[in-house]
Image (cartoon, rainbow, N blue to C red):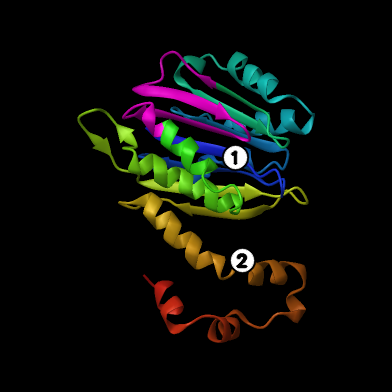
């Protein structure tokens, strides 16, 4: 009951992941995007230890296919897992176990993979891939969120007769220069989590450069209250309190 997209920007060399799911707090499952050497995600039935193992193998230079194979071979319950891995140069491998529930699968394209389970149909992944590829000049974080929105609009999770709400969502993007995430935004519980993720992204985008500057040299930065007063409109400030 999850759909995800892993993607890469060939211009900036950023890589990232966006996830939407009926499960709660999916951002806590995205640790495979924080190693700095690629992105790995296990879903359907999350196995948190996979992120640590995948990050170690990616750091050692293992291929995406080798990492997936290692995760599968290390897991007595691989038939109930769905795994996708992308190296920082955009090479992708994925695995959907034979016992994963509902409609489940993956689609691999240039610099991206979309994958999901308990979906209303394969067309959800088609829509996600199209959404990711629609505007290649946009920032990667935008393209990842747009992919989720397209999956949601195509029916998302559920079956031919019922829909399951997206109750949590997240997006993580890392750059080539440092392992810390450039973007790490999450919605842990919300009745329309993908829509809320977009709202959180729009709000945080105003602060992004300010927080980066404060990370580099806080002695040269004004207080956050002073920065907000001078940099945000009254409407923007009100939006933060919703």
Element at label 2: helix
Residue 73 image offset from top left, x and y in percent: 61, 13
Dots 1, 2 in contact, CB < 8 A:
no
Element at label 1: strand
Residue for point 36% across, 70% down: 242
Left or right: residue 102 compared with residue 68: left
Crowding near pointer 1: few (<14 within 10 Å), some, many (20+)?
Answer: many
* Nearest to the observer: residue 75 or residue 150: 150
Judging by the rendered image, the residue that carries numbered circle 2 is: 208
Look at the image and say whether residue 106 sits in the magenta stretch: yes
Left or right: residue 151 compared with residue 9: left
- Nearest to N terminus: mark 1 or mark 2: 1
| In the depicted structure, whether residue 117 falls above or below residue 198 | above
Region in magenta: 95-124
Residue for point 47% across, 15% down: 79
Residue 113 image offset from top left, x and y in percent: 55, 32
Residue for point 48% across, 82% down: 233
Look at the image and say whether residue 84 sits in the magenta stretch: no
Residue for point 57% across, 23% down: 94
Quarter of the view holding residue 37:
top right
Q: Which mark is residue 7?
A: 1
| In the depicted structure, whether residue 207 falls above or below residue 114 | below
């Amino acid at each position: 009951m999850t759909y995800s997209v892993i993607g890469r920007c060939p211009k900036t060399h950023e890589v990232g992941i966006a996830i939407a799911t009926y499960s709660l707090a999916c951002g806590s499952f995205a640790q495979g995007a924080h190693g700095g050497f690629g992105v790995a995600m296990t879903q359907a039935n999350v196995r948190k230890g996979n992120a640590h193992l995948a990050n170690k193998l990616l750091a050692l230079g293992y291929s995406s296919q080798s990492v997936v194979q290692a995760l599968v071979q290390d897991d007595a319950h691989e038939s109930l897992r769905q795994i996708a891995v992308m190296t920082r140069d955009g090479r992708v491998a994925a695995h959907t176990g034979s016992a994963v529930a509902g409609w489940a699968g993956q689609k691999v394209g240039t610099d991206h993979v979309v994958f999901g389970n308990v979906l209303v149909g394969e067309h959800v992944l088609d829509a996600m891939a199209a959404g990711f590829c629609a505007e290649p000049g946009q920032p990667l974080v935008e393209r990842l969120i747009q992919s989720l929105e397209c999956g949601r609009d195509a029916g998302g999770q559920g079956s031919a007769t019922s829909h399951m709400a997206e109750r949590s969502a997240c997006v993580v993007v890392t750059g080539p220069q440092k392992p810390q995430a450039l973007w790490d935004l999450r919605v842990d519980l919300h009745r329309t989590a993908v829509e809320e993720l977009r709202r959180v992204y729009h709000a945080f985008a105003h602060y992004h450069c300010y927080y980066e500057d404060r990370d580099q040299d806080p002695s040269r930065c004004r207080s956050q209250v002073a920065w907000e007063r001078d940099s945000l409109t009254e409407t923007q400030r009100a939006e933060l309190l919703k």
